[in-house]
Amino acid sequence: MDANRIQSTPIIKKETKNKIRVEFEGRTSAWERFKLKVFSVSFLKDVVWYIFRLILLIGISYVIIYPFISKVASSFMSREDFVDATVLLIAKHPTLETYKAVIVDNEYFRAMLNTFVLSASTAIIQTFITCLIGYGFAKFKFKGRKLLFMFVVLTMIVPHSTVRLSMFMKFRYFDILGIFNFLGGGVFESIDILKFTDISLINSFMPFYILSATGLAFKNGLYIFMLRQFFRGVPDELEESAYIDGSGPFRTFVQIILPLSVPMLITVFMFAFSWQWTDNYYTRVFFTHQGPYTLRAFIKIPRSLDTEYPGQNMYVAAIRNTCGILIMLPLILIYAFLQRYLVQGIERSGIIG
Amino acid sequence: MNIEATKKKKIKIDSAPKKKRRIASLDKRKARVGWLFVLPFVIGLVIIYLPIIYNSIMFSFHEINPLQGGGYELVPVGFKNYSEALFVDPSYVTELTSGIRELIFDIPAIIIFALFVAILLNQEMVGRTLFRAIFFIPVIIATGLISDIDAQNILSSYMGGTGASIDTGTGRNTVAEIVSVMDVEMLFANMRVGSDLVEYVVTMVNNIFNIVNRSGVQMLIFLAGLQSISPSIYESCKIDGATGWETFWKITFPMISPMILVNAIYTIIDALTRSDNNVMAYIDQVYDSGADGNVVSSAMAWMYFLIVALLIVVVSGIISAYVFYQRREE
């Protein structure tokens, strides 16, 4: 009987260009199948786990997103709302005054432009340089490679705040191995143009560029590590065939390796850009009050807003949060466009031990 | 004939070493190209990084006097800065001990949470991309300036609490706790679990926002590790009848253990550079109290770093004893 059933030809119910729906004769009825599928322990388990997981994920997402909601909500509140005990999230007297004051008085666009120029240029330099270094470590076997990589790890482990004072001194009295001092102080003392003794790079973008161009800027050790792991996963045959076709190592790097590592490069660029964008350590070390006006200096209470009243604490917090929203806004836009590359890039890097 | 034969021999003798030299030079050339690729880092290391490290260590043993014509002068004072940090400064030692203790407590919390979420986000489900995007927002945004603002933010705790508890005057005493310690202690009173453990779990739950914010990169690393486990292993497990629990402890956990080591170290390093790090904030405060920077802060920072480095060595020693490597060499 069973054999018969299998041999009976299926009835074609619906046929389109690339899909066929068939029904076998004597197949268990739909209701029967549904019952078997649903009223079983394993299905119940799956459903419970599914719901539990969904609730958990939504809960954690809420924890992450909640501060943003409260920030946005408080930014639209007017002064009176902060002393009103009945106001929680939604303002009774919604106003755009905080935004206006912060943008106009604190010169938001000037701060953003400065920070954008700084972040974009350093991020581009860092992405390219760490890519070069990571590729060098991954694909070439030269003497001292392991020792040098230990130094990369060292730059990762020693936080830059540990060496804050000497970092400041280095760029306040900039000098390369004492050469400038030697030339300016001794040999060329009488010539004004060659007097290099007191070069201060403070309050310029130069310290950032120098650190970025040498792969020493914020978290660059991490980028080098990530890129090295990624390039190790690229098959050697690719380069070998390029070499055989007569392409040099640099041309191979630019024309073959870079195009296939675009997701990884975007990931590194996004990290570098956003971490420089919200950076408050390097800008604090290298910029004094006369320095370029960046987003770090932007967080302050605007002059036109009067905060001297009973709700002061909360009002000040709300103004600072409004600054925070304006700082985050460009990053969120960038993240929305580039986030799919983030996971993709990290997944391909296959970071292992 | 004879002459020709010797000529041929000569040519052979000549050509053999030449060939060898050429191969050697190709290797050398490749090595040289490798040096060219890492050259930026070498230059930076030699002219910037090593002098900075050397200077910083030197500064911690000296006093600094800026000179009129530019440059500065160092007066050696031995261990004076260190003893000042340890014995004269009022709050350095207490800040240091509480900072280190906090760090030790945070490491397991962050790693467990990151692993848990990474496993959740690795499963097939509806809206996975959306959840992933949300979970990695803190990596990009909640750093530096923003976490600075959040650290001083009293507003979100207000809005989380009930409206009745708002105290408009001082405002700092209404920080809403998700779980109260007393409630949980009463719950666990009969279960003979140590009260320390209960307190630890409760602080962890109340700290969830902090932990979520700090575990973004760790999640990414775990996720990458989970992706690299071959699905065929899971398949064969399923065929052999292993439950999900067994699969986790016998397959996922050993395979992910190198990542636990990486993450533990990363968590420690990350904690050092975060702006809500109290020890670093205190050191910064000391630094700012001098006109051109205070050398005592260098001594403090190096002591802190040495302790943390020791912590890294101990933690990686403990974890690497349990790490399972699938491939013994790279």
Image (cartoon, coloured by chain):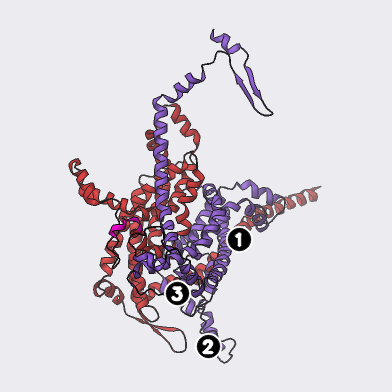
* Residue A258 in the image, given as x and y percentages of width and height: 63, 54
Residue at numbered disc 1 = B32
For the N terminus of chain A, the image quarter is top right
Give the quadrant of residue B171: bottom left
Chain at tag 2 = A
Q: Residue at x 47, y 69 (%)?
A: A97
Q: Residues within 10 Å of mark 3 (few under 14, many from 20)?
A: many
Q: Residues within 10 Å of mark 2 (few under 14, many from 20)?
A: few
Residue at numbered disc 3 = A302
Residue bounds of the magenta highlight: B159-167
Membership of A224 in magenta stretch: no
- Point out the residue furthest to the bottom here: A190
Q: Secondary structure at mark 2?
A: helix
Viewer-nearest of discs 1 and 3: 3
Kindly indicate whether the residue at mark 2 contacts the one at mark 3 (C-beta within 8 angstroms). no
Identity, as a three-letter code, of the amino acid under mark 1: Arg
Residue at numbered disc 2 = A186
